Image: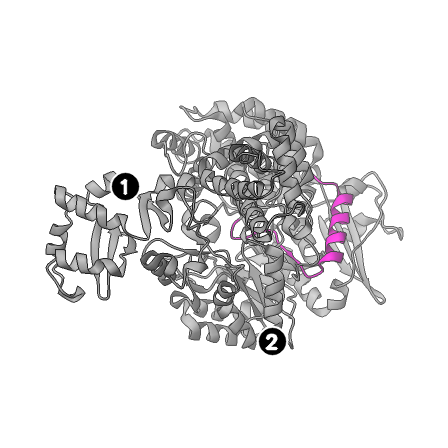
Amino acid sequence: MIPSATYRVQFHAGFTFSNAAALAPYWARLGVSHVYASPIATARAGSAHGYDVVDPLKINPALGGEQGFRDMVEALRAQGLGVVLDIVPNHLAVGGGDNAWWLDVLENGRASPFARMFDIDWAPADPDLAGKLLAPFLGAPYAEALAAGAIQLDIEPDRLSVLAHGAHRFPLRRCDYAEVLAAADASRIEDVDPFRLAAAYDPATENGLARLHDLLERQHYRLAWWRTAGDAINWRRFFDITELAGLRIEDPVVFEAVHALPLRLYREGLIDGLRVDHVDGLADPPAYCRRLREALITADPARKAWLVVEKILGADERLAADWGVDGTTGYEVMNDLSALQHDPKGAGPLASLWRQISGRPADFEAEELDARREILSGGFAGQLDAAAMAFHRLARWNVATRDLPLPALRRALASLVEASRNYRTYAADTRQPPLKALASAKAAQPASSLALDQIAAWLRGEGEVPADLRTDAVRRLEQLSAPVAAKAVEDTAFYRYGRLLSRNDVGFDPARLSMSPALFLRQATQRGAAFPSSMLATATHDHKRGEDVRARLAVLSEIAALWAQRARAWLSLTPLEGVDPGDAHMLHQMIVGAWPLDLEPADAKAMAAFAERLGGWQRKALREAKLRTSWTVQDETYEAASESYLRRLLVDGDGAFRQDAHLFVTQISPAGVANSLVQTGLKLTLAGVPDFYQGTEFWDFSLVDPDNRRPVDYDQRHAMLDHEGDGDWRAGATKQALIRDLLKARRDHPDLFAAAISPLEIKRPVSDNAVVFERTAGERRLLVVAAIGCADACIARNAPVVDETWWRDAALPDGRQISRLTNGSPFWWAIE
């Protein structure tokens, strides 16, 4: 049941199973084989994405429930379409009052049958938390919240609980009911007078405050200010999000419970495969993937499920072949396609421009290291302490290592995590420590060399220590390294480093601006041989900017001198009025990259709408960067100044910037479209399963979420599906036609698109500016020619056209002139 192509759909209350069912004919005509569904288990009310699951056992009623899902599958099957399901094994949403498992743990502590579900340390270093769970959900320090009446007792039909700040519910221990009922002069819950209860525990009175505090101190949780979480929390979160609690999916009982729904749907033939969210966050990803593969085989031995994992691969990292998966969700493909379209000659000038404008580092490595240090010491100090204690237990077990003190191990672990460039080591599976990271950590902190050497030995499995202690220590390191990488790189450094924003996206390596066609084809060939059914992606629900935004911004690397001139002029064209020049420069890039092809500067309403979208991106970007403002400590004055600057650029003011920006965008847009067509065409002709994020069959000038999750105009896309794509290149139908035609070719010639990629040599001088390859099956072959770095030709022609002047005398090995074959198209393909 391997898909030939997938179409990613974001389900929520505004787009349900019935909406998807109605679109089955369109998706079938477009040519995809499977709908790739966002998580469908019951999520928190109002969820726009489905990753905040509160009940993994049931299909979300807000999406249509079980019957709605079955009806959708039936409609899709009628059009020959299958379903691939996104699952979330790493965490559940907590807080609030809608997760029954979590509420039971709060009520019963370690005695709860659900306590094993969550990754809770019931014996942390803090003795006051022994047997307790820290609950950092208060909006103010505990004493202030208590005195202000923000913590109150609440009466439910069958339960007494604490209500904090109107949203978070914390059940009381049953053994405390008698006291509470007596204080309210009642014998049963249903007889409690709310006013009498409130008076008995009124924090405005000395006795009421003491009584309420004493009651809270006896619970299985300790209420705390939300800002204490990073330092004191004793349970694993998803990244640093306290409302998402980590699951112990390595426990067979937890695995069976969390996967009961998707395995049942697979067994019943309703789905054909799974996409695993954030596999790096799990305790043992390789073992998990193998277990999941076995579970799928057991559920239906007659079929082979398609199984891919969301895995961000480092620059020198490859997915292991023994996990039992079909590949990744394609971030590495996005990265390679993007790097391919950037001119290496732009790296130096663009870095110098960024340093001169912003005063920040010219290289990404320095920015990443600073971000890792900040994130580790700020948001994950408590988790680092827990990892250090786990390694200290190993040290104390053996007389040869007992002189390694806890502070030394903590410093060594911190330096190792800071020096890492991959999400995790996977040493538990490979017994290979991260040599480069270890060397970098030693160089940065020579005094920690002894401790780092011992940590490396433990990672290799050396030393006679209990297996459970070693497993726990390594797991804690791995589950610390992954979220630190995500928060420091994706959610911090990417928003601080502005050399060229097209190279700052999920799974990308911003340190590397470009990639040669030869290296691109070599890596694509190796990836296709190792994982021929891996996903090929160019856009996701998590991308920082749309695929066609990146394609247009890549043009700037080819015209670095012209861009530098324009960028400097813009900084003086409109007064900054307190806005950091680096922030302004990044905003200018986003305006250039995301400017819609049909947006005219004189259209005040459209310009205001564009400014509003960019304002959402800007606010998020500034807070993620954590330099002048942040999510935790917001500088409203600076945010307001930045918003005002944006409005002066696009809405208010004399209009000089928007007129000049429009002229510049108009000038480079043909080259951006050429890049977009090449990016799309290569995704459809490489080895793997191409995926299309919802709506991206038209030009995708979206920004970071939630902008990239806006409603899709499917009526327009359906109406344009028969368009041949030979009209105005500004119309989205041009891209859609290429997708439709290649998807049809993939359906008609599956053996050809399953064949290996064979790079073809062409004559210089354009050999470094073209990707040319073939795939053969029998006597047929797929021939692909893509122009790389053709901005000058497209700008000169004011169209995404690459003519004979650009190709010069370039020819295929058989002697055919490329310019005559392609007829001006930057991406050309044929089945011969």
Residues packed near mark 2 inside 10 Å, few (<14), some (14 to 19) or many (20 plus) = some
Q: Position of residue 525 (x, y in %)?
A: 76, 53
- Whether the magenta-drawn stretch holds residue 704 is answered as no
Residues packed near mark 1 inside 10 Å, few (<14), some (14 to 19) or many (20 plus) = many
- Which is nearer the eye, 376 or 93? 376
- Which is nearer the eye, 191 or 638? 191
Q: Earlier in the sequence, mark 1 or mark 2?
A: 1
Quarter of the rendering occupied by the N terminus: bottom right
Q: Is residue 825 left or right of residue 508?
A: right
Q: Is residue 252 left or right of residue 351?
A: left
> What mark, if any, has residue 142 been given in the picture?
1
Q: For residue 536, what is the image quadrant?
A: bottom right
> What mark, if any, has residue 672 been given in the picture?
none
Q: Is residue 436 left or right of residue 708?
A: right
Q: Amino acid at mark 1?
A: Tyr
> What mark, if any, has residue 300 been given in the picture?
2
Q: Is residue 236 left or right of residue 348?
A: left
Q: Position of residue 507 (x, y in %)?
A: 60, 46
